[in-house]
Amino acid sequence: MKSSKRIALCAALAAVALTIFVAESQIPPIVPIAGVKLGLANIVTLVAMVLLGRRDALIVLVVRLVLGAAFTGGFSAFMFSAAGGLAAYLVMAVLVSVFPEKLLWVVSVLAALAHNAGQVLVAVFVTSTPGIAYYIFILAASGVVTGVFTGVASIFLLRAIRSSGILK
Amino acid sequence: MIRKTKFWVILFSAVFVIGIAAFFLLRSAGAGQGATARIWLNGEIVQEIDLGSVVVPYEFDITTDLGTNRVRVEHGSIAVVSADCPDQVCVRQGAISGGYIPIACVPHELVIDILSPED
């Protein structure tokens, strides 16, 4: 792929990730439990990694985290999304080449679990209250559900991008 | 094994079921007994309330540099009834009367948990 095209695609994916991230932050929490949310922006991290590789996926992620914090505000919110996003990124980076694309949803679930574990760690650290760690159980359960959802969404998005012909 | 769909379906189903079960067990453990609520701000217990001795419900504000939460105390239970944070998760969580799952308002570094009598 030509480098100009690569940069354009990175920028487009970062814009999509940011839009999804900001839109999701406007939706009231579905389940009244701290930390349970869909994590739709992880779809873009995963798709960027499959299409463009690990390095570009990291660029897309960092752009989304920094601009996302600027739009939705708050340093503590940034710490959370950064801890979750980077933990999910690391898991994806290690596993994306291990699994066939048919099992991309497995990578997505494991990434969602890492995302939630990272967020619980930051929550324990920020509040200095060990009792928060009990949330890991419900966040593991919610990570399975949201990970399957974002994984299947990633598979569909990959298919749509490939058949659209913009990669050629 | 790790390339088999079935393996992952079973593993993730187990994680889901165990996670939900553990959460609800921890939440309901020791609920409803005459317990003490502890209010934590940034890792320090700032207030302890004996919920069993509360007769008339009352509300008070907890204000820090980060924001304000309004707490309602009733006989045997405690809840956050309003907060000036964006997500309102702690408000929607409702009252707790026991168990190990605390009310967490992470943006304000506020945590309310319940010390069960047997601890």
Image: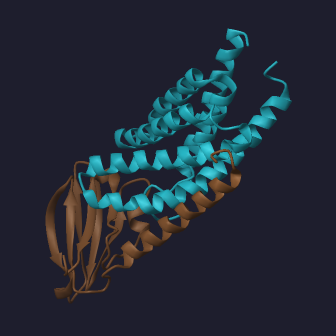
Chain colours: A cyan, B brown
Q: Quadrant of residue A18?
A: top right
Look at the picture and state if A58 lies above or below A28: above
Look at the picture and state if B100 lies above or below B43: below
Question: Which residue is depicted at the point 22% across and 57% down?
Answer: B63
Whole-percent x, y for residue B84 in the image: 35, 56
Whole-percent x, y for residue A114 in the image: 47, 45
Total marks drawn?
0
Look at the picture and state if A53 lies above or below A82: above
* Closer-to-camera residue (A119/B21): B21
The quadrant of the image that shows the C terminus of chain B is bottom left
Question: Which residue is depicted at the point 31% across and 80% down?
Answer: B97
Q: Residue furthest front?
A: B1
In the displayed structure, does residue B7 sit left or right of residue A34? Answer: right
Is residue A30 in sight in this rendering? no
Whole-percent x, y for residue B86 in the image: 42, 53
Q: Quadrant of residue B89?
A: bottom left
Question: Which residue is depicted at the point 22% across and 62% down?
Answer: B62
Question: Which residue is depicted at the point 81% across and 30% down?
Answer: A162
Whole-percent x, y for residue A116 in the image: 46, 50
Is residue B15 in sight in this rendering? yes
